[in-house]
């Protein structure tokens, strides 16, 4: 089960919980817009597969959440909260998909880690930020000397923490971000759950 421990090296905590880096995309897609379809290499419980947003929407609403990096403070909390509430999302008919610029090798580990995703939902790799860009999000360049909670250097860029709730018709019914809406990582999860329950 989930161990309730929180280890936040200072720089990781600041980066992942309260991203204050410049140039947050002003063109972030908003409520009422059509969600751009995409396919991406994803991992669930350490198993790689091709995730298709189109296929997921055929089953019901989708919670698409972008996050800066696996194995960093706020992102770990967000993944853990999604995993803990996964049954409630499933009961509401919703699919969860997390997207970051992490390489798939990191996500294979993160997706199966019992303290974080715990094999409950997939996380997809967007190393060049191409998927994020279609949703109006900028890929922030790699930050020097940033290490994850395991002490490993994080060398990829960061996508600002942003959540989109998409209905089964492919329309965005909600879009919110930590930068713009001042939401903590776990608040993204709880807000998304409340929205899908109302669809």
Image (cartoon, rainbow, N blue to C red):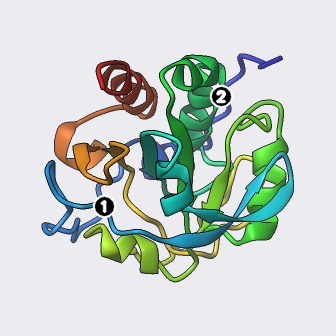
Residue drawn at x 51%, y 28% is: 93
Where is residue 46 shown, x and y percent of the image?
Answer: 86, 53
Where is residue 183 shown, x and y percent of the image?
Answer: 29, 33
Q: Is residue 166 above or below residue 50?
A: above
Task: State how far apart marks 1 and 2 are (Cα).
Answer: 24 Å
| 37 vs 148, nearest the viewer | 37
Q: Is residue 24 above or below residue 86?
A: below
Residue 106 visible to an observer of this rendering: yes
- In the drawing, does residue 152 fall left or right of residue 99? right
Specify few, some or many for label 2: CA neighbours under 10 Å numbering under 14, 14-19, or 20 or more.
many
Judge depth for marks 1 and 2 and give the one in front. 1
Identify the disc placed on residue 186. none
Residue 150 visible to an observer of this rendering: no
Sequence-first tag of 1 and 2:
1
Q: Answer with the quarter of the image where residue 193 lies.
A: top left
Quadrant where the N terminus lies?
Answer: top right
- In the drawing, does residue 110 fall left or right of residue 191? right
Quadrant where the C terminus lies?
Answer: top left
Q: Is residue 109 above or below residue 145?
A: above
Name the residue carrying label 1: 35
Q: For the residue labelled by badge 2, is the local secondary structure a helix, a strand or a loop?
A: helix
Specify few, some or many for label 1: CA neighbours under 10 Å numbering under 14, 14-19, or 20 or more.
many
- C-beta proximity under 8 Å, tags 1 and 2: no
Q: For the residue labelled by badge 1, is the local secondary structure a helix, a strand or a loop?
A: loop
Name the residue carrying label 2: 83
Where is residue 90 shown, x and y percent of the image?
Answer: 58, 25
């Amino acid at each position: 089960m989930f161990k309730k421990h929180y280890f936040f090296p200072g720089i990781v905590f600041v980066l992942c919980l309260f991203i204050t880096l410049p140039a947050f995309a002003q063109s972030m897609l908003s409520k009422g817009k059509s969600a751009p379809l995409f396919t991406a290499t994803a991992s669930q419980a350490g198993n790689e597969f091709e995730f298709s947003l189109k296929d997921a929407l055929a089953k019901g609403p989708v919670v698409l959440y972008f996050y800066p990096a696996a194995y960093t403070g706020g992102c770990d909390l967000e993944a853990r909260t999604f995993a803990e509430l996964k049954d409630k999302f499933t009961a509401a008919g919703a699919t969860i998909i997390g997207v970051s610029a992490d390489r798939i090798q990191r996500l294979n580990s993160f997706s199966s880690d019992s303290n974080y995703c715990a094999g409950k939902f997939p996380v997809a790799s967007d190393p060049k930020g191409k998927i994020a860009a279609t949703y109006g999000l900028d890929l922030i360049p790699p930050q020097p000397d940033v290490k994850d909670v395991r002490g490993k250097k994080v060398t990829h860029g960061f996508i600002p923490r942003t959540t989109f709730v998409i209905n089964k018709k492919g329309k965005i019914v909600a879009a919110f971000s930590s930068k713009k809406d001042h939401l903590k990582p776990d608040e993204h999860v709880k807000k998304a759950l409340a929205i899908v329950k109302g669809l």
